[in-house]
Image (tube, rainbow, N blue to C red):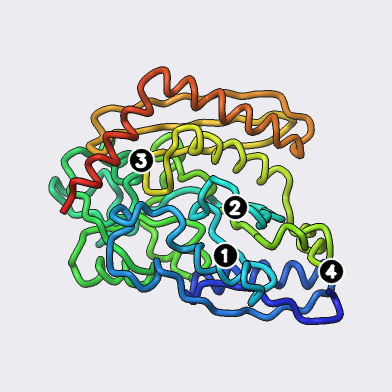
Amino acid sequence: MTGTTARLGTRRSTMATTQSQMVADAITERTGQAIELVLITSFGDVTKAHLTQLGGTGVFVNALRDELEAGNIDFAVHSLKDLPTAPVEGLTLVAVPERDDPRDALCARDGLKLADLPSGARVGTGSPRRAAQLAALRPDLTFVPIRGNAETRLGKVASGEVDAVVLAYAGLGRVGRLDDVTEVFEPEQVLPAPGQGALAVECATERAEGDLAHLASVDHAPTRAEVVAERTVLAELEAGCAAPVGAYAQYGRGRLRLRAAVVATDGAEAVRREREIGLEDPGDLAAAADLGRDLARRMIAEGADRIVAAAFTERDETP
């Protein structure tokens, strides 16, 4: 549909529109396709409930998918970590652009690092995964559930409501707030969420190989292999983006390495595993999925599913 303007659906937040415009510009540069952004409000953007109480999964993507299915937009861009692992009939993940830095970052008052925070310091995060892994490192800290965009969360540090917040490094970069970062966590400290730092381009299946086939021009095979492995771990554990599950895969030199962790909400118990396979063709997504499935099953044999279930029980019992 190069002769017409394609409609790209995106959430209204600064971060969402910025990353959607990045994808739009890349597609236009590679294919000449003109693209306009269509701003959509999701339930996750307007509700005041914490994401853990909503279950997290899908709250930021369902509105975009509804618009896709209604034909009001041609394609949508999501943060991949927000995308449920179960496929949706009639919709296709047509491209996964090259991933940005997947790590988590601490933004603390007075330039403090995690080790410098005083005992009892309040750390804001809406992610059980982040809270659990950080609790394993600093069980003496208090983890406070917070909501809002990056600017809102950083404002809670500036106002003194919390001593620090933890956010995705890539997201902070997209909204120009890297100067607020006081520490970046390596995967050995805090494993990222499956798909963190990556974006997802989704459209109607019937159009993915038709008039929207040009969207595949921004697909990055190594990134897709990585996130397939990571998201398969999440699917096998029957967990969602609100679960305390970290997974991070790295592709290079014909090999795919996957690390995963399931950590109890208080950080006191964890199952951590890693595995690596040869993968000459990063387009072999079946092999990437098999890697994620095998690793998850090994973790389940060590009790990872029990830790996930306990985390959801705690969530449901929280007033």
Q: CA distance from mark 1 to mark 2?
A: 9 Å
Q: Which mark is residue 281?
A: none
Give the alpha-carbon distance from disc 3 to disc 2, as whole Å. Answer: 24 Å
Residue at figure coordinates x 70%, y 32% from the top left: 286
Amino acid beneath label 4 = Thr
Secondary element under disc 1, as helix, strand or loop, is helix
The mark tally for this picture is 4
What residue is pinned by disc 2?
88
Rendering quarter of residue 108: bottom left
Nearer the N terminus, badge 3 or badge 2?
Answer: 2
Between the residue at mark 3 and the residue at mark 4, the CA separation in whole angstroms equals 40 Å
The nearer-to-camera label among 1 and 4 is 1
Residue 156 pos. (x, y %): 25, 68
Residue sitting at x 56%, y 28%: 293
Q: Of the numbered discs in the image, which one, if any, rests on residue 31? A: 4
Residue named by callout 1: 65
Viewer-proximal residue among 193 and 54 = 54
Residue bearing the label numbered 3:
244
- Tell me the mark number nearer the camera, choosing from 3 and 2: 2
Nearer the camera: disc 2 or disc 4: 2
Up the image or down, 150 lies above or below 289; here it is: below
For marks 1 and 4, give the CA distance: 24 Å
Distance (Cα) linking label 2 and label 4: 27 Å
| Farthest-out residue, left | 120
Picture quadrant of residue 72: bottom right
- Mark 1 touches mark 2? (CB < 8 Å): yes
